[in-house]
Amino acid sequence: MMTHRCGFQGMDGKILIIDDVATNRIVFKVKLGAAQYSPIMAAGGIEGLLLARREQPDLILLDLMLPDLSGIDVLRALRDDPATREIPVIVVSSTSAVADRLAAFEAGADDVFVKPYDDDLLMARLRNLLRIRQDLADLTNGPDGLMFGMAEAGGEFRHPGTLVLVTDRPDMAMKLRHDLSPLIRDTILLSGHNTALTEVEPGRTPPDIYVIDAGEGQAERALRLLSSLRSRAATRHAGICLLTPANARTDVAMGFDLGANAILSADMGAAEIALRLRAVLRRKRWADFRREQVQDGLRLAIIDPLTGLFNRRYASARLASMADQARATGATFAVMVADIDRFKAVNDQHGHAAGDEVLVEITRRLGLGLRAMDLLARIGGEEFLIAVPATSLDEAQAVAKRLCRLIEERPVRLPGGEALAMTLSIGLTLSDDLPAFARLSGTDLVDALIERADKALLLSKKAGRNQVTLARNAA
């Protein structure tokens, strides 16, 4: 059958519907279009997989009974393909067999709805998964839509997590923990509604999942706790599930809009609850993995990987900020460009590994000679930028000479035992020595300060190295 694609423009959320029944596809198309989503339709599993890879939908609605591939096979194929692995999938099934639901979760479904289902609940879950996906997309998309280096995840996230059952009914909690313990490897803790927030200790890793009891008139209280957990830095990325009485999931449908990751029901068997929790933990771990990658990408964007120092990109921004602060306070700051003397000879005679050892050791010594508030950055192969805020000429010269002494006073020892005598040359300028300081700003000011210090550095080299030259004396 031909693939039909709606011509909606400017809609939020591309939804792929994989269902062999034309009536079902049309019903979904109308519902999703009315909600301002953009539906794409496929009548079989093979067609759906091709569309999923090509169109990269934001979510997939999948029927289990398909003419060519089973919905389970489609799910497995989606999760095995790096291009479609992260796309949320809601299975919509006409069979109420528990085995089918379990198989769907085992294959990687994010949720399963059995017909007849509540439309409002399904749409709430759809919005919930789309919002989670969009939040992660906003996080991982860098400038100009480029991704920070996103390596593939190293297989399934199977290491145990920590799960907290939040309830004021200890008998129910003990029974649920007893039933779940043989089915999951995660640590299961118990907590009350009033203590769930206070038990998260500062600096400690928060639980992976909260299961909040929303039964026996506790729905409103459970929703308030859900909202509080989502609003706190320590718990906002946790998986949060609501546990409702039998057949009462619709009573807490708004939980999806408040950020719940699943709504469990007391009439579900322990095996199904365990698999739903695993689905929540799997997506939570994937999101954690992506956030960690972004943090690593941001760190690498401003940190020199060999020395651990800031790189030129960050140093320029920091220096511009330092200049703005100096203007506001009337203080003077110093800028130095330092260069390791005869560093090329180290690489030529001892190899680049030895050169790296020298760079790391000299970085360590420079750090010892500076304050926490000072800026130390690597801006070239063996060249460093140093900025000292709120300092006088005498103080800045004293700092520069101290740094030279720290490098000269003892050799750098290589792992093989060789001892290399190293020295440092420095060019120094003060902000109030720059004639155009008052009218320059941003990149122009940074470049002008570094240029002055760099010219002074050249004079230090020409004068015999291992010394400090002041820019005002270099003119």
Image (cartoon, helix red, strand yellow):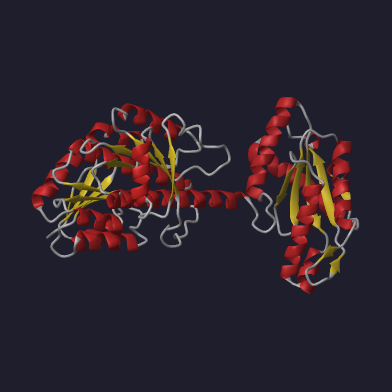
User: From where the camera sits, is residue 88 visible?
Assistant: no
The front one of 73 and 430 is 73
Residue found 84% across the figure and 54% down from its top: 425
- Residue 119 image-quadrant placement: top left
Residue sticking out furthest to the front = 171
Residue 287, x across and y down, in percent: 43, 49
Q: Relative to 72, is 395 on the left or the right?
A: right
Between 188 and 76, the one lying in front of the other is 188
> Which residue is more in the foreground, 116 or 196?
196
Which residue lies at the image location 13% right of the left edge and 62% below the top edge?
67
Is 191 left, or right, of 44 in this rendering? right
- Image quarter hosting the N terminus: bottom left
Residue positioned 35% across, 31% down in the render: 222
Residue 26 percent location from the top left of the image: 12, 46
Height in image: 443 above or below 40? above
Q: Of 2 and 235, which appears nearest the observer?
A: 235
Q: Position of residue 445 (x, y in %)?
A: 69, 39
> Which of the 4 image quarters holds residue 424?
bottom right
- Judged left or right of residue 437, residue 293 is left
Quadrant housing the C terminus: top right
